Image (cartoon, helix red, strand yellow):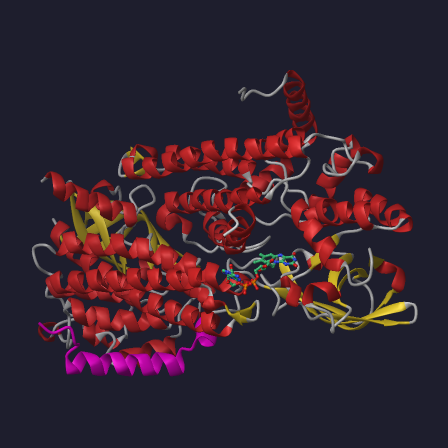
Amino acid sequence: MDFNLTEDRQMLADSLNRYLGDKYPVEHRNAVAYDLPCHDDGKWAELAELGALFALSPESAGGFGGTGFDIAVVFEALGRTLCPEPMLGAAMAARILTALEQDQEALLSGATKYAVALAEVDAPYDLQAMECSAVAQGDGHALTGRKTSVYGGQVADVFLVAAMLNGAPALFSVQAAAAQVVGYPMMDGAGAAELLLDGTPAQLLAADAGAIIADAVNAGIVALCAEAVGVMDVVHATTVDYLKTRKQFGVPIGKFQVLQHRAVDMLTEIEQARSITIKAASELGGPDAGRFASMAKNMIGRAGRLVAEEAIQMHGGIAMTWEYPVSHYAKRLIMLDAQLGDTDYHLSRVMADLAA
Amino acid sequence: MDLSFSENDIAFRDEVRSYLADNLPTAMTEAVRKGGELTKEMMEEWHAILQRKGWLATIWPKEYGGPGWTPVQRHIFEEECCRAYAPRIVPFGLNMLGPVLIEFGTQAQKEYYLPRILSGEDWWCQGYSEPGAGSDLASLKTRAVRDGDHWVINGQKTWTTLGQHADKIFCLCRTDPEAKQQQGISFILVDMNTPGIEVRPIRLIEGGHEVNEVFFTDVRVPAENLVGEENKGWTIAKFLLTHERTGIAGVGFSMQSLEEVKALARKIRRGGKRLIDDPLFAARIAQAEVDLEAMKITNLRMLFKAQQQGAPGPETSILKIKGTVIHQELKDLARRALGPVAAPFPGYLAEGNIMFGPDGTEHNAARYFNNRKTSIFGGSNEIQRNILSKAALEL
Ligand SMILES: Cc1cc2nc3c(=O)[nH]c(=O)nc-3n(C[C@H](O)[C@H](O)[C@H](O)COP(=O)(O)OP(=O)(O)OC[C@H]3O[C@@H](n4cnc5c(N)ncnc54)[C@H](O)[C@@H]3O)c2cc1C
């Protein structure tokens, strides 16, 4: 047993934390976030140079990582600084291209940005119910339907799109230039897009792609959970620090036992969240990956809400302001729940296992 | 025991209902439903509509222009306003300063200020909190020094709600720095147009502008703007706190939010089913509904007690604690129901010209974040617990 990171992963974590801390501090982050394109091209290229993207794929596919732990290392670092760059789409797309043994050099170098379009307005989490569909057209296919909340879609060059083909979910690639892309900043500052497809030309990557999509979602969940752990660590440290320095009634408010206990409850939930995230990362790619991804996302949803709400409450008014970074961290934690399945959706998947 | 309203109360409720139906403009209810910020003009227009009927200053005695309602009538009125999606009353002049002047003001102050509150001529804001004085309000530092016929004020207030619209601000200022904290504070009325006042906006978590910082540099205020006795401002501050407590449970707003969440869950489809048919989500709504039903009665029990005993007791803190938690939970559900569709930053939606959630849900996530304030201001929920454990439980 060894819960330490390998030397390589520790080095990657250190260099990403250092880079993001220096080059993507919260002032810069807030200048990039909340306004299109919610993306800094220069910083994106530098992150790629540091290996943030190469870490997402195995050596066989041209990267140097690709396991759940590699993904977690990258996203935990992104979470610590609330980096809004479109990394989730890259992680999920890398997973898909690896499974399909497709070339992904342009993805890993950062030259081409990918977004993965799964959710629909009436089927945000459960893809069985998606309505976006494909028909054969000439050499390729044509897609029709609307994909919602495509994270990173506002700057994507290529979309990997899930659509129904002959009654089964299939995966296609769509060039951004060929589709109608409506980008927008989100509540938590990062960007997304609605992808409006209307007989849009697409290239079939895989028919009957249910398993590949599920694996990409599991990888995305590991990424989101690790990101949330990074966010929560910072929120908790900031809150504890504030409890020590903010004085009311002549003493630091951290002297009030009720706040002490609640800071400890936050810590307890964060440690639990970290543990289930490690578990989900370790299972990624294996037969139980979906089950543990669901457990992790459920736990993160609950812990994230507690940590966000308690951090604001224990700070008082200051954390209600745009100027104080905790507010942005809290928004990220809360909004993250609705990505790739929320607390209830993933609990229902764990419940389904009970009946099996 | 009888939980029903009296015949008089029911007749009153019907009267309120029909007045609202006839006089509340649709543009206003639409704006309230959408959940965005209301304009100053809208708030002023709503005040004027109520004042025409004599229903604006609901907690003032009749001789000063109040309607002379019982606490139960006031409760009915608030509930009906929520049902009808009326805007909220801006409380600073009407529910805070008004009662203070009626209790502590000089004849001249009453005659000058009270009619101006009713007519909407003066928009007041509340200058209590400071950067260093939040929960521990009595540690406030803004200084007022007597200089002939004037007070000279220096210092800073913060969190001043809607101060950007205000004509006047009532301030707690330190007038005796030597005295024990609570005993050196005075309650002073200040015109926002006085030289030396600067208002700076504070942007809130969801991006909105409803609070401000107010800076005072050698601000000269006529001596007669002192309310009550010099150095007795804390008595007034405490008196005002009890008035801040009317409608503290926010039952009407929670009922409004519950109906919205139910309607939303019936409309939203997830994987071919209505969201309300998802047992996990339905359980969340049902749980909130149970809590709210209990809170309605807890609220009425405390109203009844206040009506019998004349004044609300410390146990009204229960209403603040539980009332805000229930309302916040409902705002969480309204955001949760939309899932990723709640994510777009409000304001950008119109540009893409495509719909996300059902009509009027664009601000659901923003409202959830904004409403975290309710357990912080007006005495945080921790401070309410301190009050309860000391005053009610004598611990
Ligand atoms: C949106 C908004 C609008 C507001 N509008 C106004 C306004 O118009 N006018 C005005 O004057 N003020 C206003 N306020 C200020 C509000 O009253 C203060 O935020 C509130 O009193 C809390 O003070 P604080 O924010 O400084 O937090 P602090 O007092 O620093 O408290 C920080 C944390 O410590 C806890 N705490 C403090 N003391 C104790 C204790 N003894 N035991 C246990 N826990 C404790 C608090 O509960 C909180 O969780 C507003 C605030 C907000 C957020």
Q: Position of residue A49 (x, y in %)?
A: 27, 82
In-image side of A227 versus B292 (left or right): left
Q: Quadrant of residue B188?
A: bottom right
Q: Is residue A171 above or below residue B132?
A: above
Q: Position of residue A214 (x, y in %)?
A: 16, 53
In-image side of B56 versus B202 (left or right): right
Q: Is residue A22 magenta?
A: yes
Give the farthest residue toward the top: B7
Residue at the location (15% across, 74% down)? A65
Front residue of A41/B46: it is B46
Q: Is residue A81 magenta?
A: no
Numbered marks: total: 0
Residue at the location (59% across, 35% down)? B85
Q: Is residue B8 above or below residue A119?
A: above
The answer to whether residue A152 shows anywhere in this view is no
Q: Quadrant of residue A78?
A: bottom left
The answer to whether residue B88 shows anywhere in this view is yes
Task: Tell which quarter ligand 1 is in.
Answer: bottom right
Q: Position of residue B257 (x, y in %)?
A: 49, 38
Give the farthest residue toward the front: B394
Q: Main secondary structure of the magenta part?
A: helix
In-image side of B346 versus B162 (left or right): left
Front residue of A352/B299: it is B299
Q: Position of residue B108 (x, y in %)?
A: 91, 50
Q: Which residues are magenta?
A: A1-29
Front residue of B13/A75: it is B13
Residue at the location (39% across, 67% down)? A235
Front residue of A207/A276: it is A276
Q: Is residue B44 above or below residue A255?
A: above
